[in-house]
Image (spheres, grey):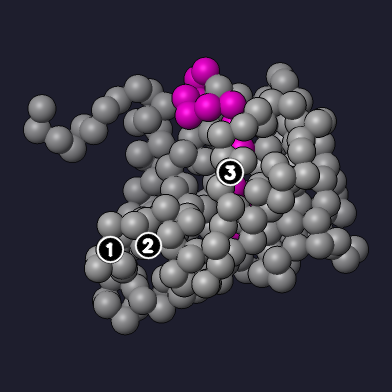
Amino acid sequence: MALKPFQICDDDLTPDLVKALAGEAYLAVDTETMGLIPQRDRLCVVQIANAAGEVVLLRFSRGVRQAPLLAKLLTDPGIEKIFHYARFDLAMLRYHLGIQVWPVFCTKIASKLARTYTSKHSLKDVVSELCGVELNKAAQSSDWGAVHALSAEQLEYAANDVRYLIPVRHKLAQMLQREERWELAQRCFQHLPTLVELDLLGYGNVFEHQ
Ligand code: MN
């Protein structure tokens, strides 16, 4: 089945979509939620983009606690899942759907390790510098809970949040290799599941002195 440039589905992927996405080496993933606290705020949307820039937007109704087909894709060892600030999305996906996403590449960590000439590591800043595209983040803080009445602006915003992640990942990977920080980046990504587990248990930074 060929993927359309943009499509929406509800509560889980379909077997056809899993089949269409399962051959990819890289998938960009993002989530939209009601807020920043997994235990309080529900997961509303999961967006997935492939290297061709095709986007699947998955809407979640209230009370959905599992998505087996999405889980299959997000735990497929042959597909690297790319997030910007994976720590948050991984916590949301683990808490609400019980999915332990792996393998993972975080473009925010990669940017911090590679782009030490700047303190600007937001998705907007990174996409602007590495892709020359200005993202419109106006819909960032909006009501994602109204999943069946998302505005055209929200849909566009959600799609754009994943559309540039794969090119960004490749540019950051080149920089990390050039600066000999690739291995360090990989070890940071390997640490993410532990960090997410600590976050969900309510621990602060256990590496700090205080
Ligand atoms: Mn987003």
Q: Which residue is most to the bottom? A: 178
**Label 3 with label 2: CB-CB less than 8 Å:** no
Q: Is residue 89 above or below residue 200?
A: below
Does the rendering let one see residue 43?
no
* Amino acid type at image mark 3: Ala
Cβ atoms at labels 1 and 3 below 8 Å apart: no
Tag 3 secondary structure: loop
Residue 83 in the image: above or below residue 151 = below
| Structural crowding at the residue carrying mark 2, measured as other residues with C-alpha within 10 Å and reported as few (<14), some (14–19) or many (≥20) | many
Q: Residue at x 42, y 53 (%)?
A: 122
Numbered mark located on residue 118 in the image: 1
34 magenta-colored: yes
* Image coords of residue 7 (percent x, y): 83, 51
Q: Amino acid at mark 2?
A: Ala
Amino acid type, residue under disc 1 in the picture: Thr
Query: Which secondary structure, mark 2?
Result: helix
Q: Position of residue 86 (x, y in %)?
A: 46, 47
Q: Is residue 25 above or below residue 42?
A: below
Q: Mark 2: is the Cβ under 8 angstroms from ligand 1?
A: no
The stretch in magenta equals: 27-40
**Residue in view at x 9 percent, y 33 percent:** 209
Q: CA distance from mark 1 to mark 3?
A: 24 Å
Which label number is shown at residue 138?
3
Q: How many C-alpha atoms fall within 10 Å of the one at disc 1: few (<14), some, or many (≥20)?
A: few
| Rendering quarter of residue 210 | top left
Q: Nearer the viewer, mark 1 or mark 3?
A: 3
Give the camera-side residue of 86 and 121.
121
Identify the residue position indicated by label 2 in the image: 110
Near mark 3 (Cα within 10 A), the count class, few <14, some 14-19 or many ≥20, is: few
